[in-house]
Image (cartoon, rainbow, N blue to C red):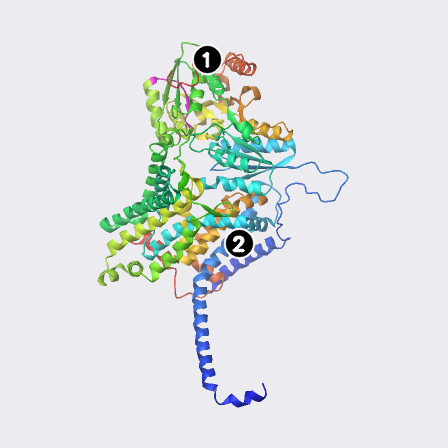
Amino acid sequence: MRTRSIGLSLFATAAIVVAACTGGGTPAPATPAPVTPAPVTPAPATPEPKVWKIGVVTDVGTLDDKNFNQFSWEGAQKGAAAIGGEATAIVTVASADYDKNVQSFVDQKFDIIVTIGFALADATAKAAKLNPTVQFIGVDQAPCLTGAGDPDPTFTDCSGDMATLLPNFQGLVFAEQEPGYLAGIAAASITTKKVIGAIGGAAFIPPVVRYIKGYINGAHSVDPTIQVKVAYVSDDLGKAFNDPAGGKAFATQFIQQNGVDVLFQVAGKTGNGVLAAACDANIYGVGVDVDQHESTPETAKCTVTSAEKKLSIAVEQAIMRVGDGSAKGGIIGNDAKNDGIGLSKYYEFESMFSSDAQAKIQAAFDGFKAGTTDPCAPANCTDPFE
Amino acid sequence: MTGPAGEPTNQPVPPAEEAEAVEAADGARAASALRRAWALVVVPLGAVILAMLVGSIVILASQVFIGVEIDPTLPLVAYWAMISGGLGSFNGIVETMVQATPLVLAGLAVGVGFKAGLFNIGAQGQFLMGALAAAYVGGQLRDQPALVAVSLAVAAGAFGGLVYGFIPGALKALTGAHEVVTTIMLNFVAISISSYFVSGPLRAPRSPFAQTLDVGNAELIVLFGRNGHVGIFFALLAVPIIWWLLWRAKLGFEIRTVGANPDAARFAGMRPRRLIALTMALCGMLAGLAGSGEILGRVGHLTAPYATNVGFDAITVALLGRANPVGILFSALLLGMMKAGAGQMQIQAGIPVEIVDVIQGLILLFLAAEIIVRRLFRIREARVGLEELATVTRSYGERSA
């Protein structure tokens, strides 16, 4: 009894000592923590250069998700460094908190607020309308606005023109057909059976269709005789994009039936199951949106490359546009022209891609830049079942 | 003082003495009430303080791992930012109340269960089903008059939760299936059900994303501040109602008797099985109300997936509030403040939001390890134990009644 009491007293003492140590300093400042170099000495002669306060609101998840949150955050940090500012992040933990988290940065008088993911589009549009002096950047966001500039979550009245209604809101979107096309060239270059595949989440989601149609065109640009097998998982969005186990089962059957030896996934988390099935079947997988060799290490062993949205570059450039005053609101397309898309690194698969194949990929990329290569031809990018 | 004081000496002695005696009795009663209240509050309070202390160690240690220069005042900066974010401004206080609203209702959903000796881990699922029902009815009635739309949508949310709470209650009553097991499993079922409906039959027709129709007129009106919606008052109202139900109504007496001793309740002519099913339905209804408040008051539609942690935070709230409605109210406000201030904490101190979870987890740990708190703060064993914790341990350790 006695000894236990002593042990606990020791614990108590330790806790108190720690508390004393931590509490011994100056009282907590009510102003933001001095992460930015504060103007210590009053030097009125030289005005302080503007230190931009850049706030990032993530989607539900973590800041180091090796996915949308992380790459957008990296872009925000680079952008902050480029224009002379500090980036701070709030990680969202609940779907109901989007508005609150955006508002936190508004309340703290931030200059630029970056929100990550389509789920935050409405919250960002609302805040952009209420706070015309704050600059907003929405990653992967193309909100539906009414004529009055309010977001319409039902997508019935999308008559509002974002560029004029919300000139302080840059909605960053990506030309999915371009990285899809590059992925198609890559897949066509490594297939031996001349049968490659793509699995999309749902056929009625336009970006998914754009990726896949670009992929078909890219593959056929290498060799028109290559067969491209395409399948969509489901019309149920939960199954389409959020069901890795279902995606794995679907892809396993798909591989058996079609005998593909390269498989492109365009199905979010369901697609992670698609990549797992590809690894199990000893064929190659192609990732989507982000560098999946890094973001999903469990399937890195068969992920040869990924059709990538260069989130980091897109965000960095959007911030730099604000910094030099050239920012205009509206839907900002990111494509090869601003290096906003691309193919991920090949890592250990580098040797599989001949210099000829790599040259073709580079040529297509340059073609997008110059406007001479159309990723939506011959197959159009709108009709999933053409 | 001098003249008239001497005169009435012999007369008013008895009344004065009487008054003194009454006063003394009042004083003693007040003191004992205070002592009782203190005995109830001291362990949760100690747990919170200890959690904040250990949390500050975690904050300090985290700097080592990030590799930044160690700032010994960082825990204070972080806590101060959190508190001033949640309470430092009118908008902050409103946000605290908004955050606390679902926690109060869901906390009651867990707390009432404790009173009946039930460990309801299913508040999360009941919350989701309430949210789904409210989103559906609200979306359908979006163009109806606000009064009709709101009351029917709220009622639908309550009913959705009620049905979903009744299922594990009925399973326990009829087959003896343990509510800890069934409610945990039903949480997953609820996620799948809501995902199915939101991305399938209830999906807003033109929306490219998986979400239900906007609730339109069924939206809860904002009464004050930026987002102080009327649901806050529903939650505040629920506290005295549940208190009255538990301590003044026959049903509450029966619930508490069943919780204390089902066999005794049966001998006293009560019907424990029926009461268990009924209590779980009531718990489900409260959690369902929490869900409908979130959808109708804050989001406006349900998405799939819908990220929330209300149902699990509710367990912390109920344990910290010792299953007492008033205690639950204050615990919910504490957690609500932590959530409301978490944004400012991230901005000003650069502390990851997960520290809020760490503190919440530590609170639970210290509540469970009550003896540590008692020893550290030199508190004598109270006569009133933590009955709700007994329910938790019994739920895991013993076979069901």
Characterize the local packing of mark 2: few (<14), some (14-19) or many (20 or more) Cα atoms within 10 angstroms: many
Image coords of residue B334 (percent x, y): 48, 53
B372 shown above or below A50? below
Which of the 4 image quarters holds residue A18?
A: bottom right
Report whether B310 appears left or right of A25: left
Residue A190 seen: yes
Report whether A216 appears left or right of A31: left
B395 shown above or below A48? below
Characterize the local packing of mark 1: few (<14), some (14-19) or many (20 or more) Cα atoms within 10 angstroms: some
Asked if the stretch drawn in magenta spans residue A121, the answer is: no
B177 shown above or below A357? below
- Cα gap from disc 2 to disc 1, whole angstroms: 63 Å
Q: Dividing the image into 4 quarters, which one contains the N terminus of chain B? A: bottom right
Residue B401 seen: no
CB-based contact (under 8 Å), mark 2 and mark 1: no
What range of the chain is rendered magenta?
A: A258-267
Q: Dividing the image into 4 quarters, which one contains the C terminus of chain B? A: bottom left
Amino acid bearing label 2: Leu
**Label 2 belongs to which residue?**
B53
Image coords of residue B360 (percent x, y): 46, 50
Q: Which element is circle 1 on?
A: loop
Which of the 4 image quarters holds residue B344?
A: top right
The residue depicted at 34 percent of the width and 24 percent of the height is A252
- Disc 2 chain ID: B
**Label 1 belongs to which residue?**
A377
